[in-house]
Image (cartoon, rainbow, N blue to C red):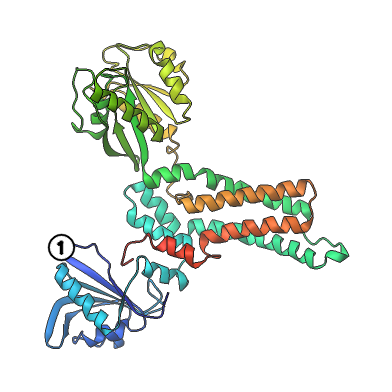
Amino acid sequence: MDFKDTIIALATPLGVGAIGVIRLSGDQSIAWVNEVFPNKDLSKQAPHTLHYGRIESNGRVFDEVVISLYKGPKSYTKEDVIEISCHGSPYIQESIIQLFVEKGARLARAGEFTQRAFLNGAFDLAQAEAVADVIAADSAAATSAALHQLRGGFSQELAALREELIHFASLIELELDFGEEDVEFADRQDLEDLVNKLLDKVRPLVASFKAGNAIKNGVATVIVGKPNAGKSTLLNALLKEERAIVSDIAGTTRDSLEDEWVLGGIRFRLVDTAGLRDTTDVIEAQGVQRTQAWVKKAQVILYVVDVSEDNPMDIQATLSEMAELDIPLILVLNKVDENQPAIQDWEGLGFPTVAISAKFGQGLADFEQLLLEVVGLNQVSNSGTMVTNLRHYEKLKQTQETLEEVLNALKINLTGDLIAQDLRYALHHLGEITGAISNDDLLKNIFGKFCIGK
């Protein structure tokens, strides 16, 4: 892949809009734009400035535009960068891009601007991946987590861990060079203390992925229960709109109904399902089968009970089956406006329990607090480091396992060469997260998921 040529792409979404932004990066950016921007000599202008004028060539005026001028290394890619803000006509945008392609610019690949920024040292790989997360963020918590990573908070923690590990790894490697003289440069107790210290930092990062992944991708929340328990009424109450049809007739909901709901800055993907019961109705039976399939994919289950009709013994067997899935489950006691349940009897089933009236909104605040607690999102910090990226999680998990192997090696007094090997693996896994260690296939996989123009 050639990173010396000048690239171009539309940085705003395709389609008609008020404006579009065309981005160029590379050595020829300023010179080529200068050739078709007669209003000013951009090469003589101060960086980080805006310039109004026309794009024209061979007597043809393409558009009136605003030029944003950035001179390397003080730009996003650390190269010379020009951003052309033109009118949002797709025809105008395509014409301007084609003009520069004819001058020699190459159409940028997906994520190539950010990839150049990484390769030119603007930020590390973890921060580069955070750029895509910021763009895709669709809730306050997801945005906060992505921005924290983009600012380098996650990378700083990993760099500190890796630096401490490098010191001891180098001492172990030094011992290997003097193997015949039976010397010990790395104090084994100090190394054990360091590894324990590192594990105290790595383990919480690994554990944070469950919540981090939920923040990034949303929490799949499946509403289940018997027919007419009030599942659709609960969905409507949470969404504050009549999203699902509500009827006194049991079995009204025969298929799954999905919608999104934001609570505490967290996006929940709500799924209202068909009521669980034995039925001879072919269509309703298919709905029940789909409910069972959704339950297996859920990250949290809301089991809604009609306390005016049911008692704990009625659903004990069903809940026992669901418990085997090892998915967090909340027992939602609905219709307390019709009958006040004995909460302690329901809590005896062993699940977090809350009493509500979905119809009148009673107890919903308690329900929302319990939901955040059960999925582990009630203490999400805007400033704390949280792992949201699956690749990072896998590398941190490998780091944790390797460090635990180092501890075991120290306890049974294994030789320095075996300890050194485990330390190399740990350093390698940490380095792959930030890009201190990378390869073309890894970079292609990461940046290939970006949008064109970023």
Mark 1 burial class by Cα count in 10 Å: few <14, some 14-19, many 20+: few
Residue 351 visible: no
View extreme (right): residue: 181
Which residue is at 21% across, 85% downward? 36
In this picture, residue 54 sits left or right of residue 210: left
Residue located 60% across and 57% down the image? 161
Residue 285 vertical position relative to residue 452 in the rendered view, above or below: above
* Image coords of residue 101 (percent x, y): 26, 79
| Quadrant position of residue 56 | bottom left
Which residue bears the numbered disc 1?
16
Foreground: 126 or 323?
Answer: 323
Q: Is residue 95 above or below residue 258?
A: below
Q: Position of residue 326 (x, y in %)?
A: 48, 30
Quarter in which the C terminus is drawn: bottom left
253 in relation to 341, above or below = below
Identify the amino acid type marked 1: Val
In this rendering, is residue 214 above or below 66? above
Q: Residue 234 in the image: state x and y as whole percent.
A: 27, 27
Q: Is residue 238 visible?
A: yes
Q: Residue at x 73, y 54 (%)?
A: 191
Q: Quadrant of residue 429?
A: bottom right
Give the structural element (helix, strand or loop) at label 1.
loop
Q: Is residue 225 left or right of residue 86?
A: right
Answer with left or right where residue 91 lies relative to residue 347: left
